[in-house]
Image: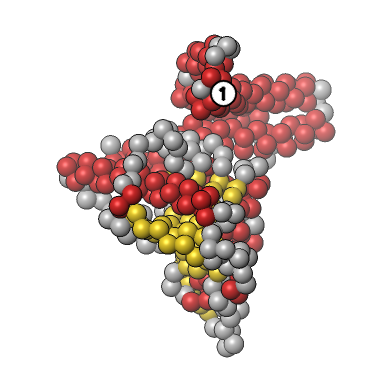
Amino acid sequence: MATDFQQEIKDLRTTMTSVRDVTDLTALEATIADLEEQVAAPDLWDDQEKAQAVTSALSRAKSEYERVTGMDTMVDDLEALVDMGQEENDAETLAEAEKELVRVKKAVGELEVRTLLSGEYDERAAVVTIRAGAGGVDAADFAEMLMRMYLRWAERHGHPTKVMDTSWAEEAGLKSATFEVNAPYAFGNLSVEGGTHRLVRISPFDNQGRRQTSFVAVEVIPLIEQTDSIEIPENEIKVDVFRSSGPGGQSVNTTDSAVRMTHIPTGIVVSMQNEKSQIQNRAAALRVLQSRLLLQKKAEEAAVRKDMAGDVKASWGDQMRSYVLNPYQMVKDLRTDFETGNPSAVFDGDIDGFIEAGIRWQIAQRKADD
């Protein structure tokens, strides 16, 4: 069946109109002009912290503006390619237009999803913590598989990552790991990955080749910024120091530089061991602790509002995604019903489809709750 290029391009333009409305390019232009004026001020760098905030804000605003206007240009170029192919009845040009249509639809879809990310912390970088749950050594192995999956996803998108803490299991895999994804909207994208992940497979650690089900918890929080007002009194924090170690207990540090920080009132524990000094590990641990407390505070406020509104709907539930490698091959998100029959690609970081479906699901849930 021949592609209806006219309808496809019309649909793309309709989506882009919606994107422009949400983005509000006129307001964005005014923001850029204001920030450029601030950057031009001769005394800007007298306050280095403020200067960095202003220049970063200008870079983000320009990037957002160019992302939207650049997408309009892509749609225009696609339309011109289609017109040329149809006017000259050139099969080769139309085949090229088919390929370009796929690329443009993907890019416009990703941009549309980005405009849906309007939560308070969606623009932030993300801190991801993975913890092995039920399932013994298979769960620990699954935890390492998920960590690699997210790091590969970040690598595919050119997002810098930084592993902050790893606790290796004795036989294989990870007990837990924490890492940062330092990119705009990393939290907005990855927040939908938070929850319980389930793996079903023939266990490579079982001599009898039995099928094993294992579970891993994924936590995603926004990275704290200096402007966030979360002050933690010193008497509410317990700090323990210990020696960093790698797989199998092999020492990777000859000093007690690793830090375990406990927030006494809540029992939240954060461990950091991947920085070179105890001071750096302590600072990193405090930042993650502040992030978790900030998110907890917002969740408690949201729970109070729901309670006052009489909303008794359950949230995500215990399992949000299943990875099945036996007796069939499938990865399925139980909230969105998005699925694929290629687990290998998923474990290699191909999770954009799950993230996009999760964001759309999340937006629908928020609208239903309003």
Judge whether residue 57 can be spotted in this image. no
User: From what the image shows, is residue 20 above or below residue 102?
Assistant: above
The foreground one among 350 and 262 is 262
Name the amino acid, label 1: Thr
Q: Is residue 201 left or right of residue 337?
A: right
* Residue neighbourhood size for the residue with mark 1, other residues' Cα within 10 Å, grouped as few (<14), some (14–19), many (≥20): some
The picture places residue 320, in percent across and down from the top left corner, at 43, 58
- Residue 67 figure quarter: top right
Q: Is residue 292 left or right of residue 283?
A: left
- The residue depicted at 56 percent of the width and 39 percent of the height is 183
The picture places residue 327, in percent across and down from the top left corner, at 56, 74
- The residue depicted at 48 percent of the width and 48 percent of the height is 283
The picture places residue 208, in percent across and down from the top left corner, at 57, 88
Q: What secondary structure is found at the residue carrying circle 1?
A: helix
- Residue 231 figure quarter: top left
What quarter of the picture does the N terminus occupy?
A: top right
User: From what the image shows, is residue 224 above or below residue 50?
Assistant: below
Q: How many marks?
A: 1
Judge whether residue 97 can be spotted in this image. yes
The picture places residue 52, in percent across and down from the top left corner, at 55, 27
What quarter of the picture does the C terminus occupy?
A: top left
The residue identified by callout 1 is 55
- The residue depicted at 67 percent of the width and 38 percent of the height is 102
Instruction: Residue at the far bottom: name it.
Output: 208
